[in-house]
Every structure is written in structure tokens, then in C-alpha cells.
Amino acid sequence: MSEVEKASTSALETAAAAAFLDALNATDSNGTEALNATAKFVATPEGTILAYGSLVLMALVPIFFGALRSVACSKSKNTSDMPETITSRDAARFPIIASCTLFGLYLFFKVFSQEYINLLLSLYFFVLGVLALSHTMSPLLSSIIQASVPNKQYQLLFTQGAGEAKEEIINYEFDTNNLVCLLVSSVVGVWYILKKHWIANNLFGLAFALNGVELLHLNNVSTGCILLGGLFVYDIFWVFGTNVMVTVAKSFEAPIKLVFPQDLLEKGLDASNFAMLGLGDIVIPGIFIALLLRFDVSLKKNSRTYFCSSFLAYIFGLGLTIFVMHTFKHAQPALLYLVPACVGFPVVVALFKGELTEMFRYEEAFEEEGLAKDDSSESMKKDQ
């Protein structure tokens, strides 16, 4: 529990997580203008269905597999694999930090050259993307690599001083599997930097989304409701109340959105008229859905009722976003539809099953560490 508390109470890490998720959420007017490619291009019905269907499918993949991996991550005893835990205090201040980050990006694009800012962002997300994609591919490639290449262990060690005064500066252990994953990810990264191809963008985007769902943990359902409720208001204000979100969305070039061409059938892989979905509309509901899966596991009933209900709710909310956007021909904040759906459906199910109190009393950290109730109460007071 001490390691989790240490991670969750770090102001720097919290701010970084907030900035990251805010950037994800800001890239495409929350995934709604997202779904309008250009003013002049008119997509065929087949191209539209293919593009939107592909976006929905790509959104579901990181949520599903990220939630499954979050269960294993929460049980990990390796401190280096510990997730970043979001407490109720973090959730309450998240919309404020996100708003400051968004407005800061807006001012940067107004004051400085868009070309140079996007160059710096591309290099920054190249490093992050390579690491995220490497971490995502590692379980998949490990079995393939071990069957054909001996998996040797390596250690990178830097020390300072000598004798009893010697201290470690860097002590990093890795193996052949890690090296191969890093090499493959670097190839994708170079492809993205040189060509900005939409497939390379999506590979990085899927890796970001899956890692976000896996490694960002809400400590309880109440915290999830606070976070989603705050971002629900934040989303509506910045999309409908100002042009800040749209301006940042149009200026921001980074692999933090999923794209799919609506003219793929006509132009093939060289297509250029894209429908888009911001990763924030995947990661933010996704971490709540992953929490409900871990709650299902904690019930030890061999069922995934709450995970399935929230997963289906996400599909409904995303479909409703697309429908409303096309009906009114206006950008829509996706969280306006996703938040009520992802929170409301599981709550209704819990009321029907008589488990609402149990759901809101669930505390992930207690489940992980097996702490006594009294100790848990004390640590919760410190967090709040």
C-alpha cells in the first residue's frame, strides 16, 4: 500500500497524467469534429460506414485488452509495474489542470510558429510512442521470439564512486524480447516521423490508448464518478463555450488520435480525407470500464456483469455521438454521451442486483494488498 500511496500522492505524476489525458482529449474537439473530415469532400455511404465502423472497432480493442491487462497489472508485485493510482483528490482537480493545459496549448499555438511546435511534439511523441508500442507488443512477441531466439538477460548498470561510497545511478535489466520490441517500435516511429502515415499514427495511437487503460487506475467507483463528472462539464464548456478546443484540435499534430480514411475505397492507402477519434474519448471512459472489470474480479462470482454492461454502454454512447453529429452537422463533445452511458448503465445494473452499496464501497488498493480495514481507513484519510 505504501508504494501505491507514494505514486498516487505525487503532485508531479498527477499533473503529468492530467496533461497527457488532456492532450489526448483535446486533439479532435473530443472526437466529434473528429468525425467531419473536410468541408469539400463528400464521402460515399460505403466509405463513411467503413471509416466509422473501423474507428469504433479500434476504440474497443484497447479498452477490452487494456482492461484485461489492468487486472494483471493491479496484482503485480513488481514495483516498476505498479499502476498510477488516481485518488478522489486527483480526480477533483483534474478538470482544472486539464483546462489550464488546454488553454496553455492554445496560447502556444497563437504566439509561436505552429511548424516548430509540431516538430517538437513529433519528437516528443516519437519517444513516447516507441516506448508505449514496445510495452504493448512485448507479451505478443515474447512467445514468438522465445521459440526462435534464445532469450538472454542483460543489465545496464551505471555507478558513481568506489568502494563503500559507490552508489547506483542507473540499474536497468532487460532481455532479448525487450530489444526486439524496441527495434520494431523504432521502425514504426521512424516511419511516422518521415511520412506521417495514418497507419503508423494508428499503431502509436492504439499503443497509447491501451497503455493508458492498463496503467492509469481509479482507486474506487466514487473517484471514477468524480473524474468523469468533472470532465463531462469540462468537455461541454470547451467545445460549446469557446473555440479553444477546435483551434488546438486543428493545430495539434501528434499520434494521439485514431484516424481512418473515408476515401479508402477510391484511393487505397494514399487516401487523405479522414474521420478521426481522439484518444481521450477512449482512455477516459476506458479506465472506468477497467475499474469495473477489477470490481467484477473482486466479487469472485465468475461473472463479468459490470464490465459487459459498461462496455456495451460505451458502444451505445459512441454510436449516439456519431448519430447526433451527423443529424445536426455540428461538432459534439463525445463525453456528453459517453459519461452518462458508461456510468448510468452499470449503476442501473447494480440497483437491479442489489449491489450498489458494495460497488461504491469497493476499494482497489485494499483488494490488492489485503490490508486490514483499520489500516485502510487511516490511509484513506491521509489521501483525502
Image: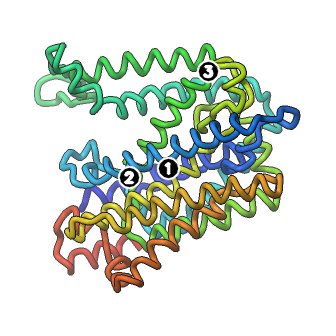
Frontmost of labels 2 and 3 is 3
- The percent position of residue 317, horizontal first and vertical second, equals 59, 61
Pointer 2 with pointer 1, Cβ within 8 A: yes
The residue type indicated by label 3 comes to His
Which label is found at residue 17? Answer: 1
Residue receiving disc 2? 84
Residue receiving disc 3? 197
Label 1 sits on a secondary structure element that is helix
- The percent position of residue 27, horizontal first and vertical second, equals 67, 42
The residue type indicated by label 2 comes to Glu
Residue at left offset 27%, top offset 54%: 74
* Residue 156 appears in view: no
- The percent position of residue 277, horizontal first and vertical second, equals 63, 43
Residue at left offset 31%, top offset 71%: 363
Distance from disc 2 to disc 1, alpha carbons, whole Å, reads: 9 Å
**N-terminal-most mark, 1 or 3:** 1
Which label is found at residue 67? Answer: none
Q: Tell how many labels.
A: 3
**N-terminal-most mark, 2 or 1:** 1
Q: Residues within 10 Å of mark 2 (few under 14, many from 20)?
A: many
| Residue farthest to the left, as pictured | 163
Front residue of this view, candidates 314 and 170: 314
